[in-house]
Image: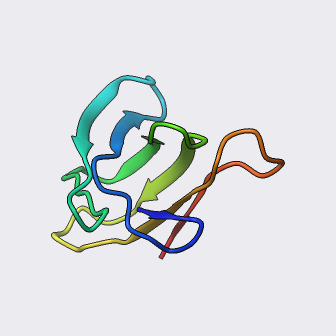
């Protein structure tokens, strides 16, 4: 996870929800490099990231492979009270 300037965001709270039931699947805190990890089956999910003083990110994610593949989700956090809020891109 990165700030708008590209700096890593450690200690961010990242929650993962099942898209269909809205049930919480898991919650983690980013490491010193702004990285986090969830182990999930294929399906539709929603990632919600929060950092004090920044606009929360709410990103839909579709996991298409249940194999032990690593997928990258880049979340960019921006300050509150500006026109564009935080966003994420699956790569």
Asked which colour scheme the image uses, the reply is: rainbow
Residue 65: give x, y in percent of width and height: 31, 66
Residue 77: give x, y in percent of width and height: 55, 55
Q: Quadrant of residue 34?
A: bottom left
Residue toward you, 41 or 52: 52
- Residue at image position (48%, 30%) is 20
Q: 59 left or right of 45?
A: right
Residue toward you, 5 or 35: 5
Where 5 falls versus 82 (above or below)? below
Q: 41 left or right of 76?
A: left
Residue 73: give x, y in percent of width and height: 43, 66
Where 64 falls versus 80 (above or below)? below
Residue toward you, 1 or 25: 1
- Residue at image position (22%, 74%) is 69
- Residue at image position (54%, 48%) is 60
Q: 51 left or right of 36?
A: right
- Residue at image position (44%, 42%) is 51
Residue 2: give x, y in percent of width and height: 46, 65
Residue toward you, 86 or 79: 79
Instruction: Assign the N terminus to one quadrant of the image.
Output: bottom left
């Amino acid at each position: 996870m990165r700030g708008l300037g590209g700096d890593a965001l450690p200690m961010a709270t990242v929650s993962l929800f099942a898209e269909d039931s809205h049930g919480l699947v898991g919650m983690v805190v980013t490491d010193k490099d702004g990285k986090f990890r969830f182990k999930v089956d294929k399906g539709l999910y929603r990632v919600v990231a929060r950092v004090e003083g920044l606009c929360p990110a709410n990103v839909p994610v579709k996991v298409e492979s249940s194999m032990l593949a690593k997928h990258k989700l880049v979340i960019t956090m921006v300050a509150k009270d500006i026109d564009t809020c935080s966003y994420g891109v699956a790569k």
